[in-house]
Amino acid sequence: MNLRECLRIGWRSITSHKLRSTLTTLGVILGVAAVITFMVLGGGFSQSVVGEIEAEQEPVMTVHTQTDPPDGFGVMLVDTPIYTESDVEALEELEGVEWVAPEGSIGLAQTEYDDERVTGVVEGQATTPDRFEHDEFVDGEPFDWADEAVVSERVNDAFEGNLSAGEELTVTFEDGEERTVTVAGVVDDDLGGQSPPLVYLPVDEHHETTIETPDGDREPVYQSLVVGVESLGDVDPAQDAVTDYLAEESDASELKEDDDEIAVQTIEDAVEQFDDLVGQLTAFIGAVAAIALVVGSIGIANIMIVSVTERTREIGIMKAVGARRRDVMQLFLVESVILGLIGAVVGVLVGLGVGYLGVTLLEWPMVYPIDWIVIAIVVGVGVGVGSGLYPAWRGARVDPIEALRHE
Amino acid sequence: MITSPLESLSQLSRTLPTGTPTTDVEDGVDPVTETSGRPVAAAVDDVRKTYYLGEPVHALDGVSLTLPAGSFTAVMGPSGSGKSTLLNLFGCLDTPDEGTVEIGGEVASELSEAERARVRGTRIGFVFQGFDLLPRLTAVENVALPMVFHGRQGSDRHDRARGLLERVGLGDRLDHVPTELSGGQRQRVAIARALANDPAILLADEPTGNLDTETGERIMGLFRDLNGEETTILMVTHERHIADHADRIVHLLDGRIEEVEGLDPNERGGRPRPDPEDRVDGSGGGS
Ligand SMILES: Nc1ncnc2c1ncn2[C@@H]1O[C@H](COP(=O)(O)OP(=O)(O)O)[C@@H](O)[C@H]1O
Ligand SMILES: [Mg+2]
């Protein structure tokens, strides 16, 4: 029996039970759709972050505190300020380090621009102009005096406006104090659309958080640091020096919680950490998808067994008119492969659709995970063969006499 | 010398005592295996088939029957007498516990499962009581099915299936699925399908069992036309007027041949036999 005829007959019997066939393939559809959606989102995220990072490899690193989250998935940032003014000064003295820009968050109650106010959305950050050395300015330049501010491009989203250098912005601090600042520049420092809209303000004027150092002095203290290195070639030794100092001699090492960890990361390290996270998520989604596919296979096998039983008489007729065992076997296998394949193809389409919606909302680029699409199709066919084998074998063994007695 | 089927049939009937068209197995000429010199289309020799359901049920208990090429044999008997079992043996669908089944010179028990499937597909045509058509396939597709399993090319298959349907008078129902056809039409599709691979033997298990008398007679007309064209026919029926269309009637009882009744070929079905030159024109009306 040739394959084309088999396909035709198989297709006929699938389409004559549309609802049943649809429900049967649901497991495969869900499994495949989950994987493809995740791959589109993951791919889009990677491209928007990594693409940006790789385009601008810079001699900078960040220092922040992180901890293992309770659910053990990825890492969690700790925002307790532990980096003191003395740490900043000591780091600046290290070999290869050009500058150290502290970052301290400022609570903003309200932000007003062009008669429009937003509450809570925009966050404040105190820093120094060095922080922006390797950032790209959409307009203007870093602030250089007290009444100026730099805003991140995303602030535009908050106001649905188009801020430019020279315009005015009024911020209300949490203590109720109001301040009108001039926008010195608009910076594009957003990695993958992850950071909130930020207003950067000069640290000297706006940072007030202090702490008692282990030496007994009271000093300003910061949540994180950005370290500028003299050249790309200095990054590795400088990273080692900074890490060593922070681990052994810094105030931060004494102020941090025991479970917390001080991370000194270059951009590549951040990418790596991100890749790890993607890897963990992939394994997780893979496991979910595998379960869905196993359930899907059982569903297909179940329906095929029902179908073999229902069609016992038909099998008898086919045998009476000359069908061999392998013809019957082929017929049922082709049917289950069609089901698996339809599940995979629909799953891929659904996955791409949901993924597309996701990346569109998040403003990430659309990615077509070709390798995963191919894998999904292959797995779909595999599921079809795997789940069809036993029912097809049963069908092939139907005794025509018994089948014809079967009303 | 090649004897025409008509001639040999009349020879056969001449060996039977006239007046009482009934013969005993013990008579000088054994009508069960007698072929009057014609080739044997199929034969079973002393076949037994027993089912054990607590007590043994002898579905067939030592039956020998020869089907001369071009003969038309009817099998009658009460329900459970082994008619279907006998037919299924001739059809290579079933195998006997004892005895041999020979089809076109091949001994069924010596064939593999795939070879038996080939015999079923190429030498034998089956017509069942339930007009067993595949419900999702159209008339043409149903008729083409045996050819699907025995590799003819697609367009060729379709043409032949259409030709066969036209021949049984269903040229205008090619693309109808079984539920869109009447009982008689379905049975005619089943007959067309049985003829798909040009079988030497046509086996029919109560082909008119679910049909009204008039439609049943039409189907018998078709059988007689086919028989006139050299197709060997073995037909199970429980209706006397249907059995009357055959050359002889084998009466089964409890798995044994009780008697073999020879019929006058000129009075079969109460009508003279059609001239073999008369081709089937396929104009039999539908029902
Ligand atoms: N598969 C089977 N299992 C058990 N008994 C069977 C089977 N097939 C046939 N028989 C028995 O064999 C006998 C002959 O059956 P069958 O040839 O179908 O009779 P008929 O067609 O003359 O009505 C019956 O008694 C039937 O019950
Ligand atoms: Mg029967």
Image (tube, coloured by chain):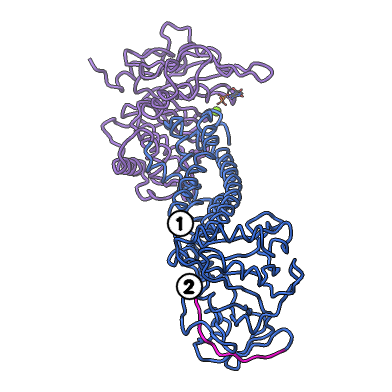
Chain colours: A blue, B purple
Q: Is residue A129 visible?
A: yes
> Which residue is drawn at the image coordinates 45% and 22% (left, top)?
B90
In the picture, the quarter occupied by the C terminus of chain A is: top right
Which disc, if any, is residue A45? Answer: none
View quadrant of ligand 1: top right
| Number of marks present in the image shown | 2
- Decide: is A153 above or below A81: below
Q: Quadrant of residue B224?
A: top left
Q: Quadrant of residue B253?
A: top right
Q: Nearer the viewer, residue B214 or A64?
A: A64
The residue identified by callout 2 is A134
| Dot 1 crowding, Cα within 10 Å, few <14, some 14–19, many 20+ | many
- Decide: is B107 above or below A15: above
Q: Nearer the viewer, residue A103 or B51?
A: A103
Q: Is residue A351 visible?
A: no
Amino acid beneath label 1: Pro
Q: Secondary structure at mark 2?
A: loop
Kindly report the secondary structure that dominates the magenta region of the rendered protein.
Answer: strand
Tell me where the magenta segment starts and ends, as one range. A177-188
Q: Nearer the viewer, residue B259 or A102?
A: A102
Residue B138 at x, y percent in the picture = 42, 47
What is the C-alpha distance between the residues marked 2 and 1? 32 Å
The residue identified by callout 1 is A369
**Both marks 2 and 1 on one chain:** yes
Say if the magenta span includes residue A187.
Answer: yes
- Decide: is B257 above or below B161: above
Residue A89 at x, y percent in the picture = 61, 70
Chain letter, disc 1 residue? A
